[in-house]
Amino acid sequence: MGDRHLEFYYDFGSPNVYLAYRALSRVDGLTLELKPALIGGLFKAANNQPPWQAFAEVPAKMSYMQREITRFVDMYDLPKYRFNPNFPVMTILPMRVAMVALEEGTHAKFFEPVLAAMWEQGVDISVPTQLAAVLDAAGLDGERMVGRAQEQAIKDALKTATHEASLRGVFGLPTWFATQDGGEPEMFFGKDCCWMFGAKPVRLP
């Protein structure tokens, strides 16, 4: 793949977002433009369901998905990953705060601590006080930013971002777009595509 810039859509609620981001962010010279989109809204617009819901009555599939995540973690050497005990976490609050961070120009400082809190530290980031504490520890004004999530303009901004992603064909996360040789942006879905952009496993299963 020749493109070194990816539009990377994310929601903190997906473990595969965490895994794909960690794998891709290690690739030298590859820039990830982080774009928030509410995963629940994407599912609704696409008439889709999260895997844990879609395959709830297929235990073999559920078991395999967990094994596949474990395999990816091992292959890409991501020892900090921990499945969040609060899963599924309603992420509308942290995703609204992501819009606050974008507006205020602090998204780069905001994203990493919240991602780590969700998928390394087991924090329930849907709880306002817990999310605010994560942001405070990152040097941000957590209480103020969490409070701003209730502003109608912020709510509308997340709805708009999610709708725009849906119009591009995004049906789940992680999804990213790459532009090849001056052509139209091409969509890629799921952590299984990471290798196409230079993310190399540390070891094979």
Image (cartoon, helix red, strand yellow):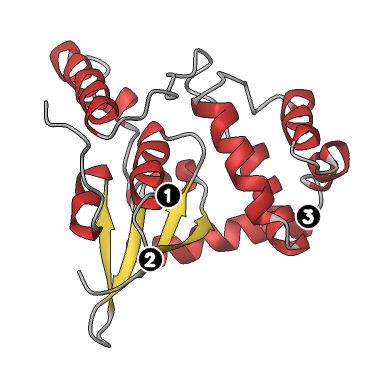
Q: Measure the alpha-carbon separation of dots 3 and 2.
A: 38 Å
Q: Amino acid at mark 2?
A: Gly
Q: Marks 2 and 1, how far apart in space? A: 30 Å
163 vs 37: above or below: below
Quarter occupied by residue 9: bottom left
Q: Position of residue 81 (x, y in %)?
A: 42, 24
Q: Secondary structure at mark 2?
A: loop
Residue 184, percent from left and from top: 27, 81
Q: Residues within 10 Å of mark 1 (few under 14, many from 20)?
A: many
Residue at the far bottom in the pictured view:
182
Question: Amino acid type of disc 3?
Answer: Gln
Residue at the (59%, 56%) spot, across then down: 159
Mark 1 belongs to which amino acid?
Answer: Leu
Asked whether the viewer can see residue 107, the reply is yes
Q: How many marks?
A: 3
Q: Quadrant of the C terminus?
A: top left
Q: Residues within 10 Å of mark 2 (few under 14, many from 20)?
A: few
Q: Using the image, determine if residue 78 lies above or below residue 141.
A: above
Camera-nearest residue between 205 and 28: 28
Residues at circles 2 and 1 in contact by the CB criterion of under 8 Å: no
Disc 3 secondary structure class: helix
How far across and how far down the image is residue 178, in percent? 31, 70
Q: Is residue 170 visible?
A: no
Horizontal side, residue 117 vs residue 45: left or right: right
Q: Residue at x 55, y 36 (%)?
A: 115
Q: Residue 152, labelled with which disc? A: 3
Please tell me whether mark 3 or mark 2 is closer to you in this view. Answer: 2
Location of mark 2 (residue):
29
User: Which of the marked residues, 2 or 1, is nearer the chain's N terminus?
Assistant: 2
The residue positioned 66% from the left and 55% from the top of the image is: 107
